[in-house]
Image (cartoon, helix red, strand yellow):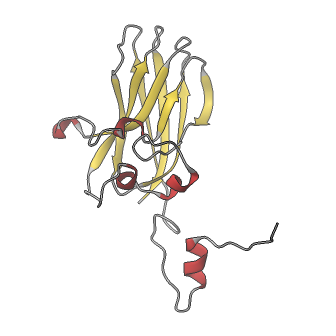
Amino acid sequence: MAVVNVKSVTVTNYEAQPRVLSSGYFAGANDIVANGIVTTGATDSANSTYRVGFIPSGARIEDIQVQNDANTAGTSYQLGVYYQTVDGGAVPVAGAAQIFANAVTFATARNVWTSIYNPSILAAGGLPANTNLRVWELLGLAADPFKEYHLVWTAVTPGTAGGNIATQYTYVK
């Protein structure tokens, strides 16, 4: 095995002569923290949606955390973006409903913030490289549409007890 010395793009840019400024969504930006609580019902159906808050298409997500009430075993939810209701409320592209997390269970209560962020490009699977991508890039778009999307939980297999889902998300733009 060989010893290697690897630099991120941010370090490479900083050490360049002349110095190259990295975009604020990589380094030096201020965090924006948002929080929303939604309530699921005991008789909710699959494909029910729970709109938590707003997220800009140009944002890079740093983390998404949840706290929740126990909502029976076998539950499965996904987290992604939808258009705002004034824009029709649908997913902007196929797979958008699960770009942040997939197969999240609320079977057991979480009383402390628990990270569930697992970014995927259109449901292709969460990868470490995806953590540097902005929302529009996770959606597979060619350019930033400069939109505000809703952050939305979608029930794949809803629970039969219902309960609260508190979601806290941090991003930079």
Residue 154 higher or lower than 64, as above or below = above
Residue 165 location (% of width, % of height): 48, 25
Residue occupying the point 48% across, 65% down: 29
* Quadrant occupied by the C terminus: bottom left
Residue 111 location (% of width, % of height): 62, 26
**Number of marks in picture:** 0
Residue occupying the point 45% across, 13% down: 162
Task: Say if residue 130 shows up in the picture.
Answer: yes
Nearer to the camera, 133 or 2: 2
Single out the residue that lies furthest toward the front.
1
Q: In which quarter of the image is residue 13?
A: bottom right
Residue 105 location (% of width, % of height): 54, 23
Residue 117 higher or lower than 172, as above or below = above
Single out the residue that lies furthest toward the bottom.
18
* Quadrant occupied by the N terminus: bottom right
Task: Say if residue 151 shows up in the picture.
Answer: no
Q: In this view, does 108 lie to the left or right of 154?
A: right
Residue 155 location (% of width, % of height): 40, 22
Residue 52 higher or lower than 16, as above or below = above
Q: Is residue 155 left or right of residue 94?
A: right
Residue occupying the point 30% across, 59% down: 142
Q: Is residue 158 left or right of residue 2?
A: left
